Amino acid sequence: DGGITQSPKYLFRKEGQNVTLSCEQNLNHDAMYWYRQDPGQGLRLIYYSQIVNDFQKGDIAEGYSVSREKKESFPLTVTSAQKNPTAFYLCASSDIPSGTEAFFGQGTRLTVV
Amino acid sequence: AQSVTQLDSQVPVFEEAPVELRCNYSSSVSVYLFWYVQYPNQGLQLLLKYLSGSTLVESINGFEAEFNKSQTSFHLRKPSVHISDTAEYFCAVRETSGSRLTFGEGTQLTVNP
């Protein structure tokens, strides 16, 4: 089955710890995205990547880091510098040249305890 | 920079009533426009999209949206809603020359019996 897989579905982190969220796609899409979702604030763009080994900051990149070493993988690290990391995180991918829509994973809910 | 504004955060309606969810965007260049739907604790699913051509686009489950360039709007409509349409709806924009995908704040549609 083609699609995007995010893992884990639920994640708990202690304050001061870094944590990495996984996102893998087998759609052969060039572009990948990370969004953060909070109630009443919609989806806010954290980072996005158009090609391997290249990525751009979105609107709320502070406290987050990413890598794009492989086309199919775009992991997101939530660092201890992120002051309010509890949220629902969504990964997406898109085939830019053809202008099609973005496909989303099922999300990871991160809770700081 | 592009931006999206969804004018209503919550829209309650009765079953079989018509509904309109409003979306306005801002961009200095040509854009692609999308509507997504999200059910609780899930990722987003594409509802419909405007890429080019006819300004009226339709989904398979009775929703339609009209691209109005002069008013920079892409409102979503359905003539008769069902209980199962209860969900959060997101409008999104992407410039035709880029990969950055920007979402609005979302509209919670609640259909009551």
Image (cartoon, coloured by chain):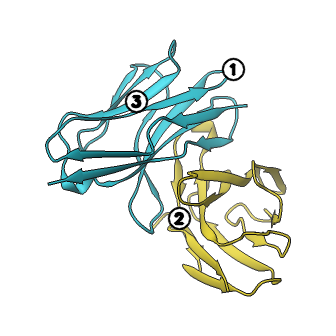
Coordinates of residue A77 in the picture (x, y in percent): 77, 72
Q: Do the dots labelled 2 and 1 sit on one chain? A: no
Work out which quarter of the rendered image holds the N terminus of chain B and state it.
Answer: top right
Q: Amino acid at mark 3?
A: His
Q: Residue at x 17, y 39 (%)?
A: B17
**Dot 1: chain letter:** B
Q: CA distance from mark 2 to mark 1?
A: 30 Å
Q: Which chain is cyan?
A: B
Instruction: Say yes or no: labels 3 and 2 on the same chain.
Output: no
Is the residue marked by circle 2 packed among few (<14), some (14-19), or many (20+) residues within 10 Å? many
Which residue is found at the position 53% from the left and 53% from the top? A40
| The image quarter in which residue A10 lies | bottom right
| Residue A46, image quadrant | bottom right
Between the residue at mark 3 and the residue at mark 2, the CA separation in whole angstroms equals 26 Å
User: Which mark lies nearer to you, 3 or 1?
Assistant: 3
Asked whether disc 3 touches disc 1, contact meaning CB atoms under 8 Å apart, the reply is no
What is the chain identity of the residue bearing mark 2?
A
For residue B94, side relative to residue A71 (left or right): left
Numbered circle sitting on residue A105: 2
Viewer-nearest of labels 3 and 2?
Answer: 3
Of residues B12 and A58, which is closer to you in this image? B12
Specify whether A90 is left or right of B84: right
As helix, strand or loop, the secondary structure at mark 1 comes to loop
Chain depicted in yellow = A
Q: Which residue is mark 3?
A: B75
